[in-house]
Amino acid sequence: MQLLKKIQKSFWVSIFVFAGTLFFAKCIEQQDKSIGGDRLKPPEDFKGKAFAGSVVCGECHKDIYEKHLQTAHYLTSQPATGNSIHGNFDSGKNVFPYSDSIKVVMQHEGNDYFQIEYVNGLVKRKERFDITVGSGKKGQTFLYWNAAKILQLPVFYYTDYAEWANSPGYPGRVIYNRPITSRCLECHTTFAKKISDEQAEPEDFEKGKIVFGVDCERCHGAGADHVSFQRTHKDKGEARFITNPAKLSRLQQLDLCALCHGGKLSKTKPSFSFQVGDSLKDFFAADTSAQNVADIDVHGNQLGLLSASKCFRMTEMTCSSCHNTHENETGKIEMFSKKCMACHSTGHNNFCGLMKTYGAVIEANCIDCHMPVQASKAILFLRAGSNEPSTAFMRSHYIKVYPFETKKVMQLIHANKKKDKK
């Protein structure tokens, strides 16, 4: 118990165009709602630019839009529904016990879902799941509204164990009052309108002015002007009033990703001020505490780890050299390995030294040898019945030779060869 205490998202032509657009939007709306509620009401404007709503992007970019709906970025926050909440609400599998007398029960009532604290069999507190945070790839945490404030529920869902657990960083007791800040939302939504004074804590937000998920307009900019122009200038080849990150400088592209994958940034301007194409240093003070690459955690500072890698330092690579943010690439080890081989090939005389021993099979998995899954020191949580904290495991972006990991991959190759011979 002592240890527990220590752990703490032309007229007729116009009519036909409008009708077609409306029909398409309704189709996409049904698809949107099927994975997480109404996400189709963007704020009127932000920094003088109006949001179009990512559903409108699908009018011209249907394939890209539909693929993006399945990405971890898009699903990183959603209204809480039966479709968006991961976790089991069946009796016996919906309980997280804190002690013999205290427990939190995840309960489904009609269209609503709740986390209910019981003390000695009596209800002490009951709060609704209002927002899910996390795509579910690793897990999900859950938020609720308290007037205009957003707070975190005590229990989260951890996918690897397929079970409910105490929210990361929480001590071994029931806590309902952890506030969610605009900086949290800056990385898990496209936009959230803050309505309290800049210095007020905890912050207040307007319920109807949150654009859930990291969607098209987070990385391309608010798009209403672009949509309006393109609808009336279909003959214009070049897109207007929108930003294509691929056409930005290397530093600008990296800054866009570093906003949420660049470590602990201390904001010097209000959240959501930074926009695609901006310089990150004009909005944040960089974290200088982790000077040694060994001190950089695998969670939240992928760019810090990548920047220390020889691959990064000797080339002009960016995050998008390997990642296509429009598609769900989870678990596609062979696909990522092929991207490695765009530079590391026999023709460049820098190919894997194990090729002679293992042949083409080694080409299918560069990743587990050179970017292994490692334990995060930042994501610690308590599982039911355990006094020892568990950790989340994430893939390192520090690209190098890991002898122990390479040995494990070699052993797996040998084991698979033996199976094939049988």
Image (spheres, rainbow, N blue to C red):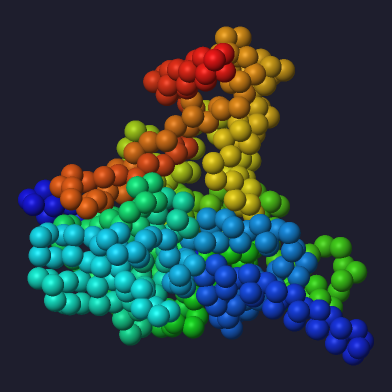
| Horizontal and vertical percent position of residue 328 | 59, 51
Q: In the shown orientation, is residue 388 left or right of residue 133?
A: left
Q: Residue at x 43, y 79 (%)?
A: 111
Above or below, comparing residue 409 to residue 273 in the picture: above
Q: Residue at x 36, y 78 (%)?
A: 109
Q: Dividing the picture into quarters, in which one does residue 181 lie?
A: bottom left
Between 319 and 339, the residue placed more toward the observer is: 339
Residue that lies at the very extreme toward the left in this rendered image: 2
Between 319 and 172, the residue placed more toward the observer is: 172
| Horizontal and vertical percent position of residue 43 | 56, 81
Q: In the shown orientation, is residue 418 left or right of residue 263?
A: right
Q: Dividing the picture into quarters, in which one does residue 103 lie?
A: bottom left
Q: In the shown orientation, is residue 109 left or right of residue 366?
A: left
Q: Residue at x 55, y 45 (%)?
A: 330
Q: Dividing the picture into quarters, in which one does residue 23 lie?
A: bottom right
Residue that lies at the very extreme toward the bottom in this rendered image: 11
Above or below, comparing residue 357 to residue 22 in the picture: above
The C terminus sits in image quarter: top right
Above or below, comparing residue 324 to residue 227 in the picture: above
Q: In the shown orientation, is residue 388 left or right of residue 216?
A: left
**Number of numbered tags placed on the structure image:** 0
Residue 302 showing in the rendered view: yes
| Horizontal and vertical percent position of residue 40 | 60, 77
Q: Residue at x 63, y 79 (%)?
A: 50
Between 416 and 361, the residue placed more toward the observer is: 416
Between 170 and 242, the residue placed more toward the observer is: 170
| Horizontal and vertical percent position of residue 228 | 76, 78
Residue 167 showing in the rendered view: no
